[in-house]
Amino acid sequence: MLKFVSKIAAAATVFAGVALAAPALAQDAQKTFYLLSHGGPSDAFWIDWNAGATKACDQLKVTCKISFSGGDMAAQKEAFNSALAAKPDGIATTSAQPGLWTEEVKAAKAAGIPIVFFNTDDPATGRQAYVGADLRQAGVIWAKYLVDHKMVKQGDNVFLPVEVPGASYQQLETEGIASVFDPLGIKYDVVDCGTDQ
């Protein structure tokens, strides 16, 4: 239950961030936001996220157009460009691949459309805000936990399963892990586990 409530709160925070960055509209005009996820609609994490986002949209009385690309970056890019063409009050997106949204964010800013990243970030794009965890710090915390609880030591090799090697979240988390493991001589392998359930 706490996990679900947290996801609703995160979704509401995304909307609040986009709404604060959006230009003022007539009070009676219904605002429209696009929420673009790299995830898949049948992934357990994104099922909960979608439920929270949908509930937040209802509570905030805004129209939300939610799409999932299922890991297909070309499909997500197409959804982003369609959202830009619709000239919404704001766009919230994930950034599973570094550098993917640089031109789109530039175009959105030129059109006065606020862009908020959630779940995975790419600050180099110039987006207005990010809602989510500090993924590098998450990697540091995980690695320190293993070291502090003597679960790993010098010479050990740690298995790091990820759905998409090279994805922005994986790169940032691995940077954090490396900052703890490398000085201690602890090795690690990032392994592609895919997204099959």
Image (cartoon, grey):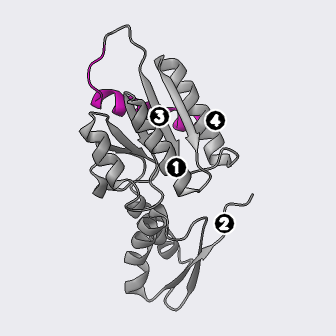
Which residue in the rendered view is the most extreme toward the right?
197
Residue 18 inside the magenta-drawn segment: yes
Along the viewing direction, whichever of 145 and 41 lies nearer the viewer: 41
- Frontmost of labels 2 and 4 is 2
Is residue 44 something that shows in the picture? yes
Q: Earlier in the sequence, mark 2 or mark 4?
A: 4
Neighbour class for label 3 at 10 Å: few (<14), some, many (≥20)? many
Residue range highlighted in magenta: 1-25
Disc 4 residue crowd, few under 14, some 14–19, many 20+, Cα 10 Å: few
Quadrant of the rendering where the N terminus is positioned? top right
Amino acid type of disc 4?
Answer: Met
Give the left or right position of residue 20, taking residue 192 as reference. Answer: left
Q: Is residue 20 magenta?
A: yes
Classify residue 3 by image quadrant: top right
Q: Amino acid at mark 3?
A: Tyr
Q: Is residue 150 above or below residue 95?
A: below
Main secondary-structure element of the magenta-colored stretch: helix
* Residue lying at the far top of the rendered structure: 28
Q: Which residue sits at x=31%, y=34%? A: 113
Marking on residue 34: 3
